[in-house]
Image (spheres, rainbow, N blue to C red):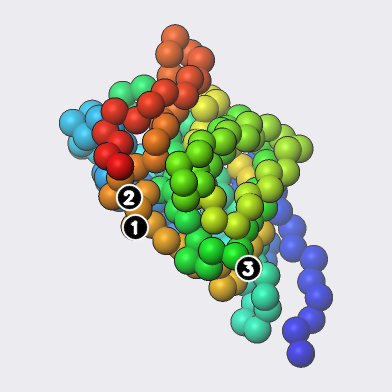
Amino acid sequence: MLLPEGVLINGLTGEVSPDTGKYTKRLSELREVFQDRAELDRMVATEGDPVVYEVIEYKKEGSDLFFGTTTMEAGNVGGEYFMTRGHFHQRRDMGEVYYTQSGHGVLLLESRDGETRVVRMEPGVCAFIPPDWAHRSINVGTEKLVFVWVCNVEAGHDYGDILKRGMRKVVVDRDGADVIVDNPRYAA
Ligand SMILES: O=P(O)(O)OC[C@H]1O[C@](O)(CO)[C@@H](O)[C@@H]1O
Ligand SMILES: [Fe+2]
């Protein structure tokens, strides 16, 4: 029998206690994701391959739900803000919740038929990600972006389309402001 438990989450650092696993994504592992690959290579070589985000999870065998934090560093690659890979769920009937704890971000969503939506990620905003919308989080601030996510353990990740084609929109820095523009590399 699974037993109830309170899990301590630090909304400034993303620390989860207790946690059951974690991973870090560095810039060199996200080469397909950014537009300016020459600048990415330069940053990997000269800036020590910076961490872009860390995911910490709490998952109990036998449960239908799991949750955790994603902590995104501030930064950009040639003006394109640090972001997650982005994915659809393998299970098209399963959505997700993102509850922002600290920092400032943009949650970029795209439906199967190509509609784009944006939800601003600000502390206290709990974003509803409906089933079958691709989702990517983007840190547009100057501090860490920390959010709690809650998902069904069977949702799974489908990276294929997003890694191959990118999303239709990208979020870039223009004179210190985040703007959403068409992805110049997007191929339908
Ligand atoms: O798996 P991606 O698209 O790189 O993004 C990581 C994010 O996705 C999640 O799997 C939640 O959907 C979290 O681990 C984290 O927020
Ligand atoms: Fe997801």
Identify which amino acid the numbered label 2 is placed on.
Answer: Leu
Q: What numbered label is drawn on residue 163?
A: 2
Are the residues flagged by discs 2 and 1 in contact, CB closer than 8 Å?
yes
Identify which amino acid the numbered label 3 is placed on.
Answer: Asn
Q: Can I make out residue 49 in this image?
A: no
Q: Nearer the viewer, residue 97 or 4?
A: 97
Task: Name which quarter of the figure residue 57 lies in.
Answer: bottom right
Q: Is residue 162 above or below residue 116?
A: below
- State the residue position of label 1: 160
- Residue that sits furthest to the bottom in the current view: 1
- Cα distance between the residues tagged 1 and 3: 20 Å
Are the residues flagged by discs 2 and 3 in contact, CB closer than 8 Å?
no
- State the residue position of label 3: 152
Identify which amino acid the numbered label 1 is placed on.
Answer: Gly
Q: What numbered label is drawn on residue 2?
A: none
Give the image location of residue 19, x and y in percent. 62, 66
Crowd tier of the residue under label 3, counting other residues whose Cα lies within 10 Å: few below 14, some 14–19, many 20 or above? some
